[in-house]
Image: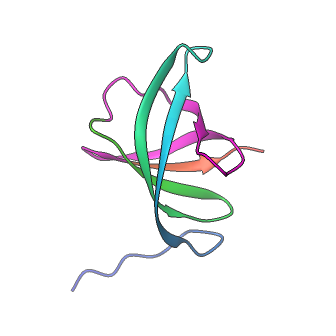
Amino acid sequence: MDIRLDKRLSPRRNTMIKAQIVFAGGNRRVDCIIRNLSDGGAKLEVASVGGIPQTFDLIAPDHRPHSCRVAWRALKELGVQFLS
């Protein structure tokens, strides 16, 4: 039996929001999908996590931009914490 403790400070809602990871002073952009979202962070789906830096901006239409720090990485997913 696999029991994992949820360390999130606020609950996440499942989403399917198209967004972009923006870094290198706005010169680099990676398309992503925000798979779930909370007040403090999100899970992002990408084609590959390779080349994505530890901190970046997350931009989605009709949502406010967020500065993010990567909390964890998998093959095609990132868990991010929103920075204040």
Residue furthest out toward the right: 84
* x and y, in percent, of residue 29 in the image: 47, 25
Q: Residue furthest bottom?
A: 1
Q: Is 75 within the magenta?
A: yes
Direction from residue 45 to residue 76 in the image, left or right: left
**In this picture, which residue range is highlighted in magenta?**
49-77
Q: Identify the image quadrant of residue 48.
A: top left
Left or right, 77 with reference to 42: left
- Going 50% across and 43% down the picture, which residue do you hit? 19
Residue 12 sits above or below residue 64 on the image: below
Query: Residue drawn 28% across and 45% down?
Result: 76
Q: How many marks?
A: 0
> Which colour assignment does the render follow?
rainbow
* Residue 24 or residue 59, whichever sits in front: 59
The relative height of residue 23 versus residue 2 in the rendered view (above or below) is above
In magenta segment, residue 63: yes
Q: Is residue 73 above or below residue 4?
A: above
For the C terminus, give its image quadrant.
top right
Q: Residue furthest front?
A: 62
Q: Residue furthest left?
A: 1
Q: Residue at x 42, y 30 (%)?
A: 30
Residue 12 position in % (x across, y down) = 55, 71
Residue at x 41%, y 36% (from the top left corner): 31
Q: Quadrant of residue 59?
A: top right
